[in-house]
């Protein structure tokens, strides 16, 4: 009797009065831009948790590819991912050739990410072809950086073996490796400015190497999810001119398994607090409510569609 009573008491204390829905957003390294973005989104979602019963939390992860695969198997509800990887996953191309993620859905395209080659100034890597014979970090398995770097290599006719080292560190580990002279440079597809590259620039003289030329031009033209852009001058110590490269959109994605209510609630929370959201990270400086719909390379989730229609944006 006593046992049953205490079991009931424990249940009453631990179970919420109404069933709450818990949602988790997969991001990237903590010093990148996905992680604070996940935090910004959750903060807005949680502002309404009393009414909506939806609680949002953020997870630091290995990046785009990991997030999409983990959404697919149901361990994550949402994730941030590069629009090139979202496209490939949704359409069964490249790394997703034999297993397209049919249930992958876009929620909104948040901000631009630029493919950034951060190098030690002393390494003298003046253009992308100079990476041959150097120690370059491509990124961990599961990162978008690694996937995009390998796509770029194909177009440039560069083989991993042409590098002295093709590194597999997480982006979060790359700045220390650069400072400690373990690598000559690293690729990072990221929204600027980011703490990661600030840390690198403050600990060792760096350059950002241009990723440009006729082959890059045709690579960008051939793929709808790429756009040419400059890493702005003045964001990082020692980088005082704009550096040409190409980029994608950082897209919030989910799957058809996630409820219309959860997705609707999340989109509404962002859109109805859009001005304060924009102030949460300098990478959002140029985004608009309309730009949130540019660069969606998987079908849009019904819950997001519903809100965008109500708001007159779709
Ligand atoms: N674009 C990177 C990736 O998918 C992550 C960038 C970030 O964490 O801000 O691996």
Image: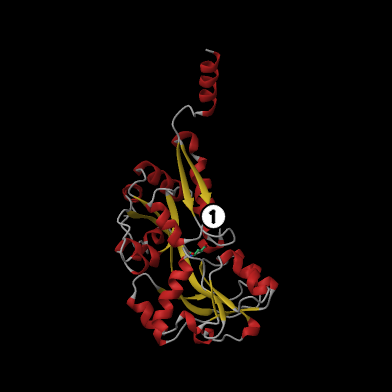
Along the line of sight, the residue nearer the viewer: 233 or 85: 85
Give residue 299's quadrant in the image. Answer: bottom left
Residue 247 visible? The answer is: no
SS assignment at label 1: loop
Query: In the rendered view, does 217 fall on the left or right side of 162?
Result: left
Give residue 68's quadrant in the image. Answer: bottom left
Along the line of sight, the residue nearer the viewer: 29 or 192: 29
User: For the point 67% across and 73% down, which residue is it?
Assistant: 179
Q: Residue furthest top?
A: 1
Q: Is disc 1's CB within 8 Å of ligand 1?
A: no
Image quadrant where one finds the C terminus: bottom left
Q: How many labels does the image show?
A: 1
User: For the point 32% across and 66% down, which residue is it?
Assistant: 97
The residue carrying mark 1 is 60
User: For the point 53% across and 28% down, which residue is it?
Assistant: 14
The picture places residue 88, in percent across and down from the top left corner, at 34, 66
Along the line of sight, the residue nearer the viewer: 284 or 130: 130
The picture places residue 247, in percent across and down from the top left corner, at 45, 72
Image: 159 above or below 23: below
Query: In the rendered view, does 209 fall on the left or right side of 264?
Result: right
Residue 90 visible? The answer is: yes
The picture places residue 211, in percent across and down from the top left corner, at 48, 81
- Which color mode does the image show? secondary structure
Q: Please tell me how crowded label 1 is: few (under 14), some (14-19), or many (20+) other residues with Cα within 10 Å.
A: some
The picture places residue 91, in percent across and down from the top left corner, at 30, 64
User: For the point 45% across and 47% down, which residue is it?
Assistant: 272
Image: 149 above or below 51: below
Query: In the rendered view, does 140 fall on the left or right side of 68?
Result: right
């Amino acid at each position: 009797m006593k046992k049953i009573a205490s079991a009931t008491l424990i249940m009453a204390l631990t179970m919420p009065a109404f069933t709450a829905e818990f949602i988790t957003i997969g991001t990237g390294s903590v010093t990148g831009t996905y992680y604070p973005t996940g935090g910004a989104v959750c903060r807005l979602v949680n502002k309404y948790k009393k009414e909506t019963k939806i609680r949002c939390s953020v997870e630091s992860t290995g990046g785009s590819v990991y997030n999409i695969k983990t959404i697919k198997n149901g361990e994550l509800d949402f994730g941030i991912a590069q629009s090139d990887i979202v496209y490939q996953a949704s359409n069964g191309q490249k790394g997703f050739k034999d297993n397209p993620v049919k249930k992958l859905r876009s929620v909104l395209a948040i901000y631009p990410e630029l493919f950034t080659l951060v190098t030690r100034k002393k390494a003298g890597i003046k253009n992308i072809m100079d990476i041959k014979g150097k120690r370059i970090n491509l990124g961990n398995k599961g990162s978008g950086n690694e996937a995009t770097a390998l796509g770029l290599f194909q177009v440039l006719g560069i083989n991993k073996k042409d590098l002295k080292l093709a590194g597999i560190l997480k982006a979060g580990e790359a700045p220390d490796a650069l400072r400690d002279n373990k690598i000559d440079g690293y690729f990072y597809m990221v929204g600027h400015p980011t703490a990661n590259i600030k840390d690198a620039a403050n600990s060792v003289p760096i350059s950002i190497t241009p990723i440009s030329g006729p082959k890059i031009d045709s690579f960008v033209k051939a793929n709808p999810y790429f756009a040419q852009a400059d890493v702005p001058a003045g964001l990082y110590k020692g980088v005082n001119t704009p550096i040409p490269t190409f980029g994608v959109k950082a897209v919030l994605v989910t799957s058809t398994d996630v409820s219309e209510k959860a997705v609707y609630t999340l989109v509404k929370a962002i859109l109805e607090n859009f001005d304060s959201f924009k102030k949460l990270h300098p990478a959002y400086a140029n985004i608009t409510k309309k730009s949130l719909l540019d660069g969606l390379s998987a079908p849009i989730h019904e819950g997001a569609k519903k809100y965008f229609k109500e708001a007159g944006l779709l």
